[in-house]
Amino acid sequence: MTNVEVRVRSSYSALSPTCQKAADYLLAHTRELYSIPIAELARQSGVSSAAWVRLCKEIGYTVLKDMRQQLYLQYSAEPQVEVDPTVHFSDLREGKSAQEILQNVTAASLQALQRTSKLMDPAAYQTASDWLLQSKSIKLFGMGASGLVASDLCDKLLRIGKNAIFNFNSHVQLSYSATLTKDDTAVFISNTGKTQEILQALEAVQASGCHTIGITHYSKSPLSAGCKLLLYTSSKEVYVRSGAMSSRLAQLMVVDALFTVLASQDYAAIQGTLESSYQICMSHRVDHR
């Protein structure tokens, strides 16, 4: 699956009916799309040329030519291994065998990682790394499963000597959102980008002038609209009973990538801190013989 397809699928539910019709045609004819003139594209898909232009803008491309170029480049590259598209993704239900469950969970996890990798923008990760390195303090925000990811990033930052803060309590998060300054960075993690507590904290930090980084699903949301920099994830998630699973893995992948970029960029300065934190943790392991 190309990153164009990932963007379309991730944004699909937020598109207008006309753009969805264009998106349906795109997903069904991706390999031929970059060679069809726009007038013919409009005729075959049953929507106007303007609708195609709107679709391109909705998924992050300035003009149709940019989207076509991306499709051409990706189909010209070596083919990538994809998850079996026939695998059925669903929420928890009665009667599934252990083998079927294991296959579905594995496929969903792999697909989330593949989709997210296609949305990774090196320039965005470099900017995020620069901000974190230059910040006097880093405040992290996340609820539920996203809170686990925020906690993981906080632990990583502390290991290399960064002044990072995270607390699972939403009231505490709101409290430290009021302490940010223009020299700090706030990192907001939310798959939907619509979590009320996170949006309240985002609103609270706006007046400070601090850097704001959002780690969220590729789609329009209040969080993506309010953050200065976005690191996107993409996963096919169900929310009825089982809770976030593949979205959490996608978020962890983003956090791991961000931390690795940061650590590599400042490796000479943090090498000693990394070694010290590693050694003190190793001292608490049992030597089992």
Image (cartoon, grey):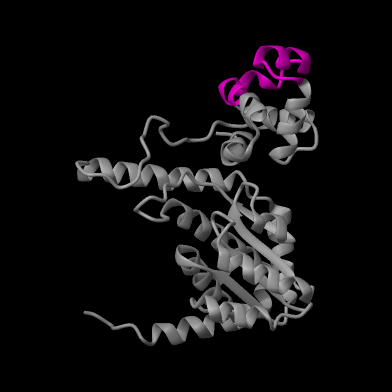
Q: In which quarter of the image is residue 65?
A: top right
- What kind of secondary structure does the magenta stretch mostly adopt? helix
Expressed as whole percent of the image width and height from the top left, the position of residue 140 reads 59, 73
Q: Give the range drawn in magenta.
A: 24-48
Residue drawn at the location 50% of the way across and 67% of the way down: 143
Q: Is residue 74 above or below residue 92?
A: above
- Closer to the camera, 123 or 278? 123
Expressed as whole percent of the image width and height from the top left, the position of residue 30 reads 61, 24
Expressed as whole percent of the image width and height from the top left, the position of residue 149 reads 50, 66
Q: Is residue 84 left or right of residue 98?
A: right
Asked whether 43 falls inside the magenta stretch, the response is yes
**Residue 72 visible:** yes
Q: Is residue 47 above or below residue 195?
A: above
Q: In which quarter of the image is residue 41?
A: top right
Quadrant of the frame with the N terminus = top right
Quadrant of the frame with the C terminus = bottom left
Residue drawn at the location 76% of the way across and 80% of the way down: 181
Q: In this view, does 129 lie to the left or right of 276?
A: right
Q: In this view, does 223 lie to the left or right of 285?
A: right
Q: In which quarter of the image is residue 145?
A: bottom left
Expressed as whole percent of the image width and height from the top left, the position of residue 62 reads 80, 37
Residue drawn at the location 68% of the way across and 81% of the way down: 178
Q: Is residue 117 above or below residue 21?
A: below
- Closer to the camera, 244 or 199? 199
**Residue 162 visible:** no
